[in-house]
Amino acid sequence: MKKIFLLLGGIAILGLFMNAKTDFEFPERLDFAGEEVPLRIPDVKERMDRELVVNTQMHGSTILILKRANKVFPIIEPILAKYNVPDDFKYLAVIESALVNAVSPAGARGVWQFMPQTAKEKGLEVSETVDERYHLEKSTEAACKYLIAAKDKFGSWTLAAASYNGGMSGLQSQIDFQGVNDYYDLLLNEETSRYVFRIIALKEIMRNPRKYNFIVPESQLYQTIPVKKITVDSTVTDLAKFSKIQGINYKTLKYHNPWLRDKKLDNPTKKNYEIEIPQIN
């Protein structure tokens, strides 16, 4: 009987592999932020194909990303537009964090995965009680500031995106050494060499989900919850009690304000903080 179960299990696993769909039609043209991907170069086309194949097989995680995007993109998009950063950069946030407040082994945090020092350099507060890397609007603005500086330095949005992973100095050293200033001509480390291709792959899949066999009914997309914002300019010693005064519980407060990192809010300088209170009927 045990052998039969093992055999059936093996057949089921084999069936999953056999049913994996990679028969999509490869796009004739792709671009990032209006900068064309040179698919005429054989290794570029192969690398692009790799990321499309890999990401179309990550079915569960891609479905969740599509659901989250309905809630997160409407917050990110107008901020990118405000700073004149191409809309395609919202897909950079997708590959950085899958649109959740992720924590990397190296210590990067939030949807945009800022390290503490870079976050502070871009105007975010990072302390024991407040970490604005978890603040979607403020961290998006910080990402825009970084990307604008990178575009000014490298001259292309594609290289600006690559520098978000490889760092400006690291990317510049490779440009200087190799004598080329096009991302698609550079030989970079494994992660950075795949980075922009991954962004473009998610852009392509998320813009054309049915083409890649991802079907999510609109009723299953995550929705933005209306909130009101209240300004706090003093220390809050007990956020649980504060929550109840606002008509919600502590869990709900922290869910909507993940940048609040403690049970209290220290504010000795009387800084103005905006706290979101969901309006749930």
Image (cartoon, rainbow, N blue to C red):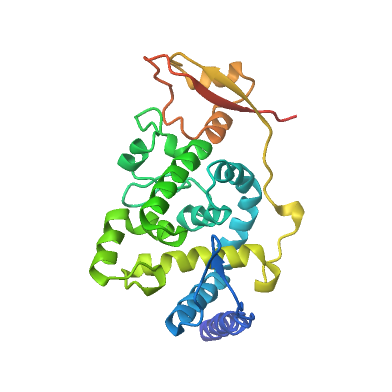
Q: Is residue 3 above or below residue 269?
A: below
Locate residue 29: give its quadrant: bottom right
- Specify the quadrant that holds the N terminus: bottom right
Does residue 55 appear to the left or right of 124 in the view shown?
right
Q: Is residue 254 above or below residue 25?
A: above
Residue 183 visible (yes or no):
yes
Residue 113 visible (yes or no):
no
x and y percentages locating residue 137 in the rendered image: 53, 37
Which residue occupies the foreground of this view, 41 or 133? Answer: 41
Q: Residue at x 60, y 46 (%)?
A: 77
Q: Residue at x 36, y 66 (%)?
A: 191
x and y percentages locating residue 102 in the rendered image: 45, 48
Locate residue 133: give its quadrant: top left
Locate residue 203: give its quadrant: bottom right
x and y percentages locating residue 94 in the rendered image: 52, 55
Q: Residue at x 62, y 61 (%)?
A: 63
Which residue occupies the foreground of this view, 175 or 245? Answer: 175
Q: Residue at x 46, y 82 (%)?
A: 41
x and y percentages locating residue 74 in the rendered image: 64, 45
Which residue occupies the foreground of this view, 139 or 228? Answer: 139
- Specify the quadrant that holds the C terminus: top right
Which residue occupies the foreground of this view, 19 or 102? Answer: 102
